[in-house]
Image (cartoon, rainbow, N blue to C red):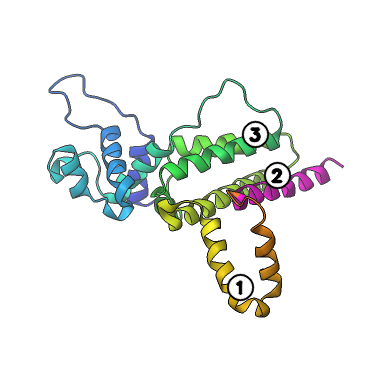
Amino acid sequence: MGDKHAETARLLWGPRSKPTRGPKPTLDLDRIALAGIEIAAPEGLAAVSMQRVAAQLGVTKMALYRYVPGKSELVALMVDAAIGPYPAVDEQPSGWREQLEDWARRLLAVFRRHPWALDATIGPRIMGPAELAWTERAVSALDGTGLTGAERMDAVVLLVGHVRGITQQARAAGPAGNPEAQLSAILGDLMQASGERFPALAAALASADQSDGQDQAWEFGLQRILDGLAVLIDQRAH
């Protein structure tokens, strides 16, 4: 493990001990992560810097470096704080499919609240205990299904990819709302002029206009992923 990854792991997983003697610390890692999130929420991840976070907290940049060595470690703390541990619920759905559907909807809500996290969760990285609690929950939902460990992990990757794709579309659409409706409206205008070149697409769009497209891509993709897993699980049972 490289020094940078080791430092990230220490910050995310190490004990967050507080000194029992001497003056009360000015900062702690939770406050630092929250300050970064407060900057990223309206402005995006690119706006986050050690200087901006220090100013947000009312301390010098050098004081901040005593707690967090750089931006990559700061972002790792922000991600784990924003995602948070998997919510405790009084009653879990019973079947694997219902559990994964509930899990995916909860994860979608997290990314919609924190779209900047899309940019912060790309590529190999050290995950924190809160984020891994989500993975643990999804993998454990598939216990007893006959799927191998690798297949259970791949199922989680599929679901996360769908959540990310839908969140990216929504972010690109901006505050105006439903990206599918915007796309359909633009394509509809194009098809009026050039529909003879794309007859199948023109017919599909005309049909889609007759139905409510709200969250259609999200729901369709989620159910098809779960359908595919159901086929594989059924094969393993016979």
Total label count? 3
Magenta highlight range: 216-238
Q: Label 3 is placed on what type of residue?
A: Gln
Foreground mark, 2 or 3, reads 3
Query: Rounded to the nearest whole Å, what is the CA distance between mark 2 and mark 3?
Result: 18 Å
Q: CA distance from mark 1 to mark 3?
A: 41 Å
Of the residues shown, which amino acid type is indicated by label 2? Thr
Determine whether 221 is above or below 189 in the image: above
Q: What type of secondary structure mainly makes up the magenta span?
A: helix
* Numbered label attached to residue 191: 1
Rendered residue at 74%/37% (across/down): 145
Mark number displayed over residue 148: 2
Q: Which residue is mark 3?
A: 99
Q: Distance of mark 1 from mark 2, alpha carbons?
A: 46 Å
Mark 3, Cα crowd under 10 Å, few <14 / some 14-19 / many 20+, is some
Q: Nearer the viewer, residue 163 or 131?
A: 163
Mark 1 or mark 2: which comes first in sequence? 2
Whichever of labels 2 and 3 marks the residue nearer the N terminus, that label is: 3
Q: Is residue 237 left or right of residue 201?
A: right
